[in-house]
Amino acid sequence: MLKFPTRNKKLLEWVRQMARLCQPEGIVWIDGSTEQKRELEEQSLAEAELIELNQEKLPGCYLHRTAAHDVARTEHLTFICTRKKRDAGPTNNWMSPRVAYKKARGYFKGAMKGRTMYVIPFSMGSVGSPFSKTGVQLTDSRYVVLNMLIMTRVGVAVLEHLDNAAEFTKCLHSKADLDVNKRLILHFPEDNTIWSVGSGYGGNVLLGKKCLSLRIASFVAHKEGWLAEHMLIMGVERPNGQIQYVAAAFPSACGKTNLAMLVPPEGLKRKGYRIWILGDDIAWMRIDSDGALWAINPETGFFGVAPATNSHTNPNMVATISKNTIYTNVLLKPDNTVWWEGADGEPPASGIDWQGRAWKPGMEDHEGRPVLGAHPNSRFTAPIFQCPSVSFRLEHHHGVPISAIIFGGRRQHLAPLVYEAFNWQHGIFLGATMASERTFAQVGKLGEVRRDPMAMLPFCGYNMADYFRHWLVMGRRMARLPRVFHVNWFRTDNHGRLLWPGYRENLRVLEWILDRCNNTVEAIPTPIGYIPRACDIDMTGLKLEPQALEELLKIDPASWQEELKGIKRFFKQFGRNFPDELWQEYEELAGRLKS
Ligand code: GTP
Ligand code: SPV
Ligand code: MN
């Protein structure tokens, strides 16, 4: 490839400038070719950035270990850098662009000394489509390059597009010395720029993903009149061939990937459902000329949670990750295959854990806690086209029409298995009041319930009060509104045991949701929304504990009164800017709970 293979002067000048700042030993442009990928893999193996896995059992697969303190997104080091603080809103960390650039410049200065700077031209969505966005990421991490090659469309076609297109997101990343005290993940939506330094972990460094496709994209979507959301997209096909599409927002590590890859349970097989996946993490949604909401997945791969992935919970994923996959922070078995807690089969008798130490089942640390083989947030990166249930519509640049939007979270208590919003505005209230127990996907206190509206708390690139208003405005512009639902797979009994088996059994709930969309089933109005009659959830082939379904659908007004307090506190922080419509929904819910 040419040394500077672009006619885009702005791109050229920016690459030169950033190279002057980071002082790499050389610059390599990523062209998307198999040969170049092979070369990068060879170099990564030579420098122990990757470990080659058993190529007979796992062809094209590699293992990577991140630094022990660099295993999840660090939200407290993630900033939205708008000129006005108000534009970032009370839920985001904010830094002024001037201060942020200055501080980060200090960390980037000479950070790539002795390393190569890779230039990755990438497209989120089909190259050149009006619905897509183009980015260029500079990085000193080969692991990042190899992941971006799976997760996004990379290479010459993007460069050719850039020859004639002025606009692209400038993404700069250096792992620098992986020092958490010198780590920053900075977003400059007004400059279409992302700077990330000091990390080598997924969501912090694959800048096309959360940084561009959610934080920057949500900011742009607000201006341009569309939605960038933390949502899976899936199609449910009935035996008559009709496919209906749904999008669902659950917080990190709360079940998007698993739902999107669902395989129908035995008991419902006779009904002949087939499930098609379009995306497991990000949806960009626009109103099309038919007045409906259409969604695309801007990514081309999965960066999925490894623990608990097995042939029962997610057979489609097990098939997907059998080749051409990068595993991060899982256990290495003696035969050079991989394992994690909740993987198929027995734990291996021995192995090398995610930190590279010898491991045996049953080991405990000095506080008596089990030593895990794989990190709880260990992940795999795999091409979406390897998924057996991938939708044929994936390459359609304008996507699929959405019949239902589903919000959900991890709640041991309170939220029933499923309920439906009374209307669009109430649906936005359901999204805006989402809460979930914290998972390992971000650094923080595990299990603590936090408000995570629309699963976008860590990913909204602007003031969330404006974000909620944008959802309301979108509703007014649509002629065909999706119906809105809330689900909770995680409700427990008094002993803390899950009441719902989840995974493939969730199809029973999806079926009710689609029946509601098609107006073929009744529902019971309650203060919080419509819930199913127990008899309308098809339980063929699934035996729950007696009364479990009733328990799953139960609404406890006293707990909801408590919940109101948390909702009020959350809404109040937005001050006068908060949409009246959502306060009105709050008052109405309070009223219904009283009567
Ligand atoms: P991100 O990639 O972090 O955005 O997460 P995700 O929403 O795609 O999460 P994923 O589907 O990977 O789920 C992660 C965790 O949720 C794993 O621990 C799963 O075992 C668990 N999980 C997923 N679906 C279900 C379910 O239906 N029931 C139960 N009980 N657990 C589930
Ligand atoms: C999430 O945390 O929601 C993820 C993983 O999807 S990461 O890309 O690391 O953010
Ligand atoms: Mn996610």
Image: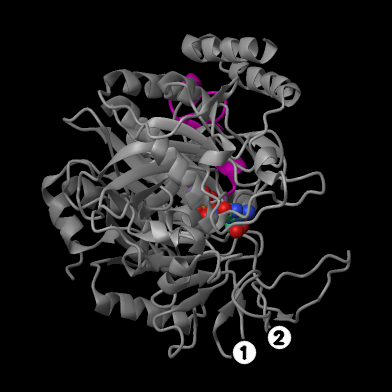
Percent coordinates x, y for residue 512 in the rendering: 46, 41
Q: Residues within 10 Å of mark 1 (few under 14, many from 20)?
A: few
- For image coordinates 59% across by 48% down, the residue present is 74
Say whether disc 2 or disc 1 marks the residue closer to the N-terminus: 1
Please say if 90 is above or below 437.
Answer: above
Residue 160 visible to an observer of this rendering: yes
Residue at the disc numbered 1:
334
Give the secondary structure at mark 2. Answer: loop
Percent coordinates x, y for residue 594 in the rendering: 69, 11
Which of the 4 image quarters holds residue 59?
bottom left
**Contact (Cβ within 8 Å) of mark 2 with mark 1:** yes
- What amino acid is at disc 2? Ser
Q: How is the image coloured?
A: one colour
Total labels: the figure holds 2
Residue at the disc numbered 2:
350
In the image, 80: left or right of 156? right
User: Considering depth in this image, is 497 or 365 the residue closer to the camera?
Assistant: 497
- What amino acid is at disc 1? Pro
Q: Quadrant of ligand 1?
A: bottom right
Percent coordinates x, y for residue 305 in the rendering: 54, 60
Give the secondary structure at mark 1. Answer: loop
Q: Residues within 10 Å of mark 2 (few under 14, many from 20)?
A: some
Please say if 158 is above or below 87.
Answer: below
Magenta residues, as a range? 73-99
**Is 78 within the magenta?**
yes
Please say if 579 is above or below 390.
Answer: above
- For image coordinates 40% across by 78% down, the residue present is 323
**Is 251 within the magenta?**
no
User: Considering depth in this image, is 362 or 177 the residue closer to the camera?
Assistant: 362
Which of the 4 image quarters holds residue 595?
top right
- For image coordinates 31% across by 60% down, the residue present is 119
